[in-house]
Amino acid sequence: MARGEGAEQFPSTLLPSVKPITPDGIKSAKKEKEKKTNKNLSICSKLCYAIGGAPYQITGSALGFFLQIYLLDVAQLDPFYASIILFVGRAWDAVTDPTVGFMVSRSPWTRHGRMMPWILLSTPFAVISYFLIWVVPPVDNGKVVWYLIFYCLFQSLQTCFHVPYSALTMFISSEQKERDSATAYRMTIEVLGSVIGTAIQGQIVGGANAPCLNHTSSLNDSVLQLSSEVNASHVSLDDTKQAYMLASGVISIIYVLCAAVLFLGVREQQDVQRRADRCLSFVEGLRLLQTHGPYVKLVTGFLFTSLAFMLMEGNFALFITYTLGFRDDFQNILLVIMLSGALTIPLWQLFLTRFGKKTAVYIGISWAIPFMILVVCIESNLIVSYIVSLAAGFSVAAAFLLPWSMLPDVVDDFKVQNPDSQGHEAIFYSFYVFFTKFASGVSLGISTLSLHFAGYVTRGCVQPDSVHLTLKMLVSAAPVSLIILGLLIFRSYPINEQRRKYNRSQLQALLQDSSEQDSDTSESSDLGSAV
């Protein structure tokens, strides 16, 4: 009897703890398994994500190294108007960054994610506008308006690609280590993209250099020495224009292919972080960033160091062509700088992993200082110029890698300190790009305007001594001063390796709590529907 009663009670005591297999249960199990696997990114996903960053750097290197000399010597604009185009274009680009950042934050989630539709839809229009930048319009009176329109239009469309792509770093994995690894892949491909952009633009255009004009008025003592070298290759200005158009066409095709790889190879994760409870205005977003000290110090420090390299980038082609006198080799010297940077990106990733990111900032950025000084102190020697360019590429690699590797740390730090204010990743990234681009626009505008006041001669075979002095200041004295100022600001940057580890553990706890709350809510809703 007791055995019979026990047999009757045995099933009844266990039945409540047995959960039936339902479609919702299978879906929940798949979701949990997917969360675990999504933490670790495959090499293929990292490569596809990294390739998406190439278009920005390919077009950026082509514009950065060649647009100024193109406007002056091929489009034959006055330096004053060229400075207006460069400044307005960069300033407009800077303004569009936070605007696009807010629009991305307000975008609804689609089956392709929130960031991917922006990247996909902006690509074809960006390619068309980029190509038209390198077309010389047939009407002389409309050149300035032409370049202003298409330069600003391209910068806007490029922003619609790059801001979502930058914020995508926070949505490909919840693991800080995986994001750092993906960032290293991205920086390697981006520097390779800069190499590709410099190589395509430089080698195609370098084979059809715009012929210089030998002005009979004596600019300085070197006129007589170089007068016999004028247009020895008999290349016409029309040939140079065609070369620029061909280079822009090749770069446009690569742009489309890279965007397609990114779209097809990367899956944006919806539940990695929570969305913001409400959208912030521009002023609210700026106030939000100002209250977070680590972000302000990081952006300010990199603002000065980035300006240093942008000043050198924007004026180095003119410096090599006129001050050093290597008119036929400037594209190869630029290529050596970018190739050296691409090859040393993995070394800097290993260095910051072992010794910390702040140490990498001090050593990597300051490495360029002696070579910036050396390049203006030596006599015009081609071999020495190649050696200096090779060494300077090490710092270019660090300048590429470190800002994008450290920005996620600042965002994580903000999330730990403000657990109730989440989903502002696009704002952090867009404002960083805004400050950098606006300052670079000011610097490029001022540097080109300074060439105007120094007496720059459009398509001249030689330049006045005042132009040589101005170029030396723009590629050496000013960048060195900016680098030193930026490194001094980094001394007060508070996020070290210990704080990074602490933030990582706190974020994991927050994510676990959020997951448990979502699970409880789901179970409650299922129970309510069952009742």
Image (spheres, rainbow, N blue to C red):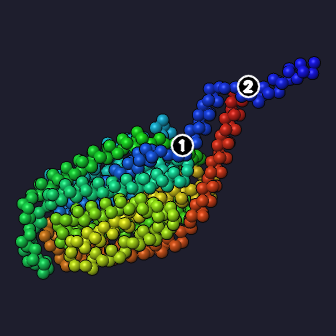
> Quarter-wise, where is residue 515 in the image?
top right
Q: Report if residue 36 is visible in the image.
A: yes
Residue 181, percent from left and from top: 48, 53
Q: Is residue 309 above or below residue 513?
A: below
In the foreground, 186 or 268 = 186
Front-lying residue, 426 or 186: 186
Left or right, 344 with reference to 110: left
Tell me if mark 1 has few (under 14), some (14-19) or many (20+) residues whose alpha carbon lies within 10 angstroms of its own.
some
Q: Position of residue 336 (x, y in %)?
A: 28, 63
**What residue is pinned by disc 1?**
38
Instruction: Name the spot of residue 153 as percent of width and height, x first.
Output: 32, 50
Q: Quadrant of the N terminus?
A: top right
Residue 439 or 310: which is nearer the viewer? 310
Q: Nearer the viewer, mark 1 or mark 2?
A: 1
Give above or below for 120 relative to 140: above
Where, quadrant-wise, is the C terminus in this rendering?
A: top right
The reply, left or right, for residue 64 in relation to residue 416 is left
In the image, what residue occupies the spot 70% across and 38% down?
Answer: 520
User: Which labelled disc corresponds to residue 444?
Assistant: none
Q: Which residue is mark 2?
A: 531
Badge 1 element: helix
User: As shown in the figure, which amino acid type bears the numbered disc 2?
Assistant: Val
Please report the residue visible at 49 percent of the width from the left and 42 percent of the height from the top.
268
At x 47%, y 48%, the residue is 168
